[in-house]
Amino acid sequence: MDLALLKNLSNAKILVVGDVMLDRYWHGDSGRISPEAPVPIVKVSKFEDKAGGAANVAKNIARLDGKVGLLGLIGEDESGQILENILAEERIDSQLVSVCDLPTISKMRVISRHQQVVRLDLEEMFTEQHSQLLLNRLQLVLDEYDFVLFSDYNKGSLCLIQKMIKLAKSAGKTVLIDPKSSDLNLYRGADFITPNLNEFKLAGGKTGSEQHLANSARVLISDAGIAAMLLTRSEQGMSLISADEKHDFAAQQLEVSDVTGAGDTVIATLAVMLGAGMQPKDAVEIANLAAGIAVSKLGAATVSPEELSRKLGQYLQKTGEHYQTPFDDVLQHIEFAKQNGETIVFTNGCFDILHAGHVRYLAQAKARGDRLVVGLNNDESITRLKGPERPINPLDERAMVLSALASVDWVIPFGAVEENDTPAKLIELLSPDILVKGGDYAVEQIAGADHVLRHGGKVEVLEFLNGCSTSKVISKIKA
């Protein structure tokens, strides 16, 4: 697997077309049974609105740094406006087409104690006339993308999907489809199709043995004129099947919290990795890892490059390979975390030779919130501060070591010019919720503290572990 290609995630230009939805979550505790009927009473304490269906696929692509556009149908209603606002926050180039006679597809889930109590669906089937509106819009924007991903939830938006596929293929685009219909001929011409095991069986797939499965999959895609099938098989993992090859991938998550949206994560990750230049087998391998992360979360979840990096690190540990999120993409990921309501903690330092004191300090800093950002002095800054013999380790290597720690979510370098030897400008850019500094400092002496306090954040000073310092390590080596 060529991990260097992971630095090309933003090269993926993907258009998602399909059934968009608004996923609504009502959270609360349930300690009583209703006297009116044998059902739990849920006292609702929290409301959440999220992008669902094809919109969730687009969100997954955006969270993985792919360039994504979205085409879908919504009603002229409050739910449609809420969905458009969510997509704008995600910086997804959404071109949703409003129809006046039908509602935006909405699904409301009541959640108590991390379990779904009930799901309420508000939806009507879109017609071929509505689908024609999407086909017209597709013709206008197709040239801007390299990949077209059709997310079919059988709600009618893709009534004309065969015409859409022909249009995309005639323009030289790679086509991926998350199918719902049991008639795979509807998807003729697709490059990749990603049914789950139940959808595969309904389409005529046989699962009596691995050989039966592979043979029947090849018959299905051959008859339908589809190049390859990525079959998602729940606890059995995934299988990538083409006319002459079959590759199996073991499931990566044994404890499943919620499978909602897992298929969205799979096809979104597959598309992004193909867009980054990966071979199909390697792209599926990473999509399988992403699925393992997604099903460990509640609701229609997304996967960040940092989470994928950690999972890859565990998966590829025996190879010694490592992937680190490009510095330029980190700011966007921090913004996504803020949108999710996560508490951002910031600290900084040189971290030239990592030792036990650093590790304990960073773990204590992370414990103050949900995500830890480490501002890292660049090489020139360290030389100015520590002298011409420092740093011992260059910036990229220091960043790699730090990012491998479980406590560290993001590493951002600073110190491009002499006046930026403190992280004050970086702190102003990030506006963390909590600023942490190690050592014997008064709050007013800490760079960036005034900005954090002024914006309602907190500043904390932590003690270093006695006897641990990079200077002592260097002196001991010299001695």
Image: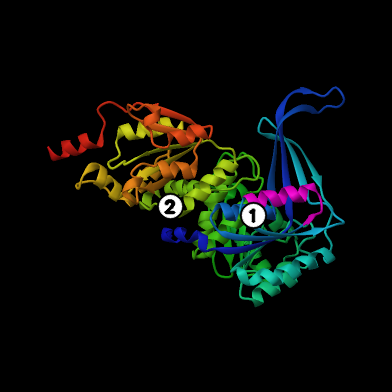
Residue denoted by label 2: 327
Which tag, 2 or 1, sits closer to the chain's start?
1
Range drawn in magenta? 74-89
Q: Secondary structure at mark 2?
A: helix
Q: Looking at the rendering, in which quadrant would you find the C terminus?
A: top left
Question: Are dots 2 and 1 in contact, CB under 8 Å?
Answer: no
Name the residue type under label 1: Val
| Residue at 61% across, 51% down | 90
Q: Residues within 10 Å of mark 2 (few under 14, many from 20)?
A: few
The answer to whether residue 166 is visible is yes
Residue 90 in the image: above or below residue 183: above
Q: Position of residue 427 (x, y in %)?
A: 45, 41
Q: Is residue 82 magenta?
A: yes
Say how the picture is coloured. rainbow
Q: Position of residue 391 (x, y in %)?
A: 25, 46
Residue denoted by label 1: 57
Q: Nearer the viewer, residue 108 or 337?
A: 337
Q: Main secondary structure of the magenta part?
A: helix
Left or right relative to 299: residue 418: left
Q: CA distance from mark 2 to mark 1?
A: 25 Å
Q: Looking at the rendering, in which quadrant would you find the N terminus?
A: bottom left
Name the residue type under label 2: Phe
Q: Quadrant of residue 150?
A: bottom right
Q: Nearer the viewer, residue 430 or 69?
A: 430
